[in-house]
Amino acid sequence: MAGVSPLAKFKLVFLGDQSVGKTSIITRFMYDKFDTTYQPTIGIDFLSKTMYLEDRTVRLQLWDTAGQERFRSLIPSYIRDSSVAIVVYDVSKRQSFLNTSKWIEDVRRERGQGDVIIVLVGNKTDLADQRQVSITEGEDKGKEYGVMFIETSAKENFNIKSLFRKIAAALPGMDSYSSVTKSEDMVDVNLKTTSNSSQGGQQGGTGGGGGCSC
């Protein structure tokens, strides 16, 4: 990928099964809040956030995809021009972890081996007593596929900022994590929701970071 220029825009697409917490991660990052009343994301939601880095400003475009099987045909078109793919699973649901292989392979099929940053995220670490996937298993799968790995809890705000710092540090032109400024220097911009014509114009979520933990 080409080097970063000032005001560079990067498309981040969130992938994974239904109810693994994709929308919850985005909402925590955008608004520092957690909602237990999400409804399933319909189609695709779009939000964006500007990160002020040491020597440039980067616009992150966050695309929240629906996890339901009936929306799978929509997703490849959103993967094709993405800079980063965040593949999320629920550490308390083993099948969602097993399915990450398919999501990663989908990304590689659409974007090739070296032209996209992939991050494997084990979410819902707050459900420790229900855990079905160990940290070691997540790390091993990350190594197997050659992708970054991190565990998070959107509910407890665990590692959410660290996740996006890792992503920012891996963007083209960023040489080290130290180039990323403090999270307090991040601001929200250009909030909007997109609808998908194939779903009869239905809008995904509720615009303001709505949708579900899916």
Image (cartoon, grey):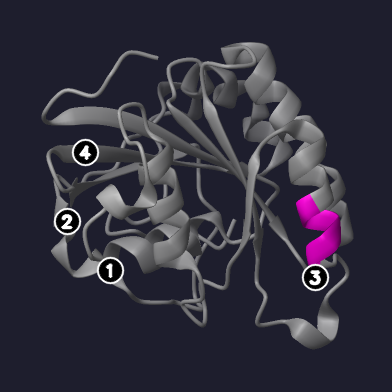
Residue 23 in the magenta stretch? The answer is no
Which residue type carries mark 4? Arg
Distance from disc 4 to disc 2, alpha carbons, whole Å, reads 10 Å
Sequence-wise, the earlier of marks 3 and 4 is 4
Q: Residues within 10 Å of mark 3 (few under 14, many from 20)?
A: many
Q: Is residue 203 visible?
A: no
- SS for tag 1? helix
Residue at 70% x, 23% y is: 106
Work out whether residue 188 or residue 186 is closer to the camera in this orientation and state it: 186
The magenta segment is 135-139
In the image, is residue 147 above or below residue 25? above
- SS for tag 2? strand
Residue 35 in percent (x, y) is at 44, 77
Instruction: Identify the residue under disc 1.
Output: 31
Residue 138 in the magenta stretch? The answer is yes
Q: Is residue 51 left or right of residue 66?
A: left
Residue 205 in percent (x, y) is at 41, 53
Which residue type carries mark 3? Ser
Tag 4–tag 2 contact (CB < 8 Å): no
Residue at 77% x, 41% y is: 143
Distance from disc 2 to disc 1, alpha carbons, whole Å, reads 8 Å
Residue 61 in percent (x, y) is at 30, 37
Instruction: Identify the residue under disc 4.
Output: 59
Instruction: Identify the residue under disc 3.
Output: 92
Res 161 → quadrant: bottom left
Residue at 50% x, 37% y is: 43
